[in-house]
Amino acid sequence: MKHIKLIASLLIFFSIVTPLFGATDVSAFQSGTTPKTPIEHFIVVMQQNHTFDNYFGTYPGANGISKDICVPVSLSNEKASCVAPYKITNEPISDLSHSDVIFAKQFQNGKMNGFVDALNSLNQNGTLTMGYYDDQDIPYYWNLADEYVLFDNYFSSAHTGSITNRMFWVSGRAGREFNRIPEGGFGDIPTIFDKLQERGISWKFYIRNYDPSLNFRKLKELDYLPPQIQWVPLLSFDRFLDDPELSSRIVDFSEYYKDLENGTLPAVSYVLLLGATEHPISDPGLGEKATQTMLQALMQSDSWKSSAFLLTYDDWGGWYDHVPPPQVDDRGYGFRVPSLLISPYARKGQIDHTLLDHTSILKFIEENWNIPPLAERDAKANNFTSAFDFSGSPRPPVFIAATREVPAPRVEPRRIVIYAAYGAAMLFAFLILVRAMTAKENIQRSSYEPTLHEEIKP
Amino acid sequence: MNLRNLSILRERLTQLPKNPTLVRWWNRDRETTARIVSVTLVMCLAAGIRVWGLNQIGFNTDEAVYSGQAAAIAQAPVLSDIFPVFRAHPLLFQFLLALLFNFGVSDLAARLLAVAISVATVFIVYRLGSLLYGEYTGILAALILAVMPYHVVVSRQVLLDGPMVLCSTLTLYLLARYALTGNPIWLHAAGIGMGLTFLAKETGIILIGAVYSFFALSRDIFVRIQDLIISFVLMVLMILPFPISLWLAGGSKVGQQYLIWQLFRRPNHTWDFYLTTVPGQIGILVILLAIAGLLLLWSERTWRERLLLWWIAVPVVFFQIWPTKGYQYLLAIAPPIAILASRTLIRWLWVENPFSRSKQLSTTWIRALVGGILIITLLSSSWQTIQPATTGTFIAGTGGVPGGREAGEWIQQNIPGQATLLTIGPSMANILQFYGHRKALGLSVSPNPLHRNPAYESVNNPDSDIRSNNIQYLVWDSYSAGRSSFFSDRLLQLAARFNGRVVHTQTVTVTLEDGTKVEKPVIIVYMVHP
């Protein structure tokens, strides 16, 4: 009986104590939905297929294209001819290959000299890879960089295309098959949204032109991979399709505006701008305009003062970038992609050199909302908190111009001329009037009878 | 002190009033004191009624424009980027305002400056009336102008007409002084005054016609050609700051554009606008008295009436013919009319009435009665006019726009910087720009450069501008809607088309016919997005 009591007591003791010990790590991440920083709303837009040099290679002060760069046309004869970076003016662009094989050929184990040759070998226009845009082509993004934070050391997570990079974006992992959606979906790979859901932290995945009928199960019936399925990893998870609690959070982009208006913008928002993609052959201006609309709506809302907006690109799209990406594992990193942080707490006009990749987004979410890391990548990733300055009050919203046009030099009126001319006139008038007033009065006419005081005496 | 000394002192004291010099001094001093007290009271009344509730309502569009110009001259932050320095008019008043705005932009300070100028005009009318017809006429004329609704309403606003009338009345005074003394210095000074009149508002230059007509048709006023030339040269010298600043400060092109636009703009009112609007504001009784005096005192006619009549006739004829009409354009005629009316009241009743045996008693009573009615009706009318409008409608030039300042301040505090607003017309756009510190465009601004104020930017394709994120807010207001239902409907259509959401409604308290007061929305701000 004694033993029974002892055992029972021990069981009760351990049943109480064990969870306490076991929960020590977890409790740190279950301290509620209050963020650690003033950022209560984090919005991430992931665009497609551009490198840092392709968009910001000529941005002043950034780690961009140097003048002496010239990439050989053929690796078999490097000295024969080369292609220097050039400005894409009105040249039509094409969707350049950007598979892991192409990456390897372009990367050349860090020599970074195979960009042209790799594409030429596929009978593509290899020269095009060296093309770049500048402030005249993507003025809004450059203006955002002027006003907020531009990251020039942000790499795509994987040296392959969209699917794997976007898996890193949501889960910190590459997925099951490299840059492919498995037939059965991504299974039980945990995502950041699972963790947010568990902790009651609001989230939404906004998809522009969302078609709820399109998901990975539909692939069997299709002979192509619809962008919506390719670029929204959640649509390849059974639970995000079947669990109403989860599926109801994948919504059409129009809800973004309603949420802003109603003050119901979730803590974490991922956004896919279908129909406004910058994926070649699309015009970058399309994405710019959509981003501008999103940002203006955010600035017009009450959520602005506690929000951060990150714009990034899933992969390099075959374009040239001169910085060899660190190879942290057998999946990546891939080449640098453009990335901008817009927030009332973002430092003004800063070029941030922190080593980042898509899992840095997870890192920020995890640290801001006390969520444990999902995988090794995000655990090791750097956060981009250096881009924020939380010491002051949030910056008031200011719409950023959509043009880079240097306004025609405004002819500033020479105000000193106005002051001098009118001041002199006033002084001159004063002097003449004083002169007149002090002149001796000599009334010559008194035709009006009676004058002055006489008439007031009837 | 002994008794003898006391008796001497008493004797001297009793002798004091008998001293003729002292009696004259004593009497003159009392007269002067009475005059100073009267004039001071008139000035205080003028200032009081002009200051009363002065800043209760924010600027109207013209006030916003002139203050915006002054802010641009003073290089006030934000406003100097929104408002151009050069527009249609010379910059004398804006220059004075800019001196004030160097210490900070304030609508109240601007209006107080306008009031100071207005009260100075009342004083000059007193001096002019006194000069022409004696102290009583001067004081009464000043009193009439002090409470005249037309002058009260216009001159307490930040408009150019108040300063222009100060300068033109000063010119009139200087001319009268010349006519009275024949001293050429007064004619030269009148040239200066005319130059100042132009610098205050260029339309004041039409009064040269009055000067010319007066001299040309007054044989009894001798003018030497050389004095006229000197006077003209001085006037030109005074006008010079306008072209010089345009030329040297970089605004000559703008000035030319305005000139062309002013010359060819379309009529904005019907031909009878002044006839139906202005007499009531000057005071029907005032006008009747002025006319009656001219007729009844025909035998006393001199160059004085000619001078005043030309000062009235020229602006009336000119602006009646000129296609563009404005409520305040005839303000320059207010001082001479006030003097003529005052003259009638003071002079006519002193003329011996052969049918009246007890003339002294009757004229005093009649004078008091008519004068009292005149002043009370004018004061009452002014009092009603300066009260905030409670109808939600508005006529340009009659005062501030209810709700405009409040809506602008809301915009400044709640709408992101660099946002662009689209209003029904440019009038509300100016107000919102001044108070809101945001760019505002008017939907009704014509794309045809000949049909729009050069300062305004037309919105050729508002759909495209909203789709391109160039316009983010639409502002509807009842005042502009009342003037143009077409553009009001167009703006509301745009709001509906682009997911317009009301983010702010500015209301004013409106009194209904049954006396109940309701909050009427006068300005509604919509947020739109593609």
Image: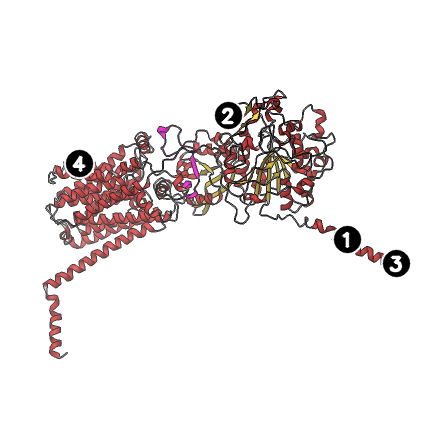
Most extreme residue toward the top, as rendered?
A123
Discs 4, 3: same chain: no
Q: Give, as a single range, the part of the protein colored magenta.
A: B432-458
Residue annotated with mark 1: A18
**Could you say where residue A36 lies in the image, as x and y percent from the top left?**
61, 48
Inspect the image, locate mark 1, and give the three-letter code of the amino acid beneath it. Answer: Thr
Question: Quarter of the image containing the N terminus of chain A?
Answer: bottom right
Label 1: chain letter:
A
Inspect the image, locate mark 3, and give the three-letter code of the amino acid beneath it. Answer: His
Q: How far apart are marks 2 and 3 (CA)?
A: 86 Å
| Residue A256 position by quadrant | top right
* Mark 4 vs 3: CB contact within 8 A: no
Between marks 4 and 3 in the image, the one whose residue lies nearer the viewer: 3
Residue annotated with mark 2: A89
Establish if B27 lies above or below A207: below
**Could you say where residue A139 lies in the image, as x and y percent from the top left?**
50, 32
Earlier sequence position, callout 1 versus callout 2: 1
Q: Distance between the residues labelled 4 and 3?
A: 130 Å
Q: How far apart are marks 3 and 1 (CA)?
A: 21 Å
Query: Is-magenta flag for residue B441?
Result: yes
Q: What element carries label 1?
A: helix
Residue annotated with mark 4: B213
Between marks 1 and 2 in the image, the one whose residue lies nearer the viewer: 2
Label 3: chain letter:
A
Earlier sequence position, callout 2 versus callout 3: 3
Residue annotated with mark 3: A3
Q: Is mark 3 on a helix, strand or loop?
A: helix
* Mark 1 vs 4: CB contact within 8 A: no
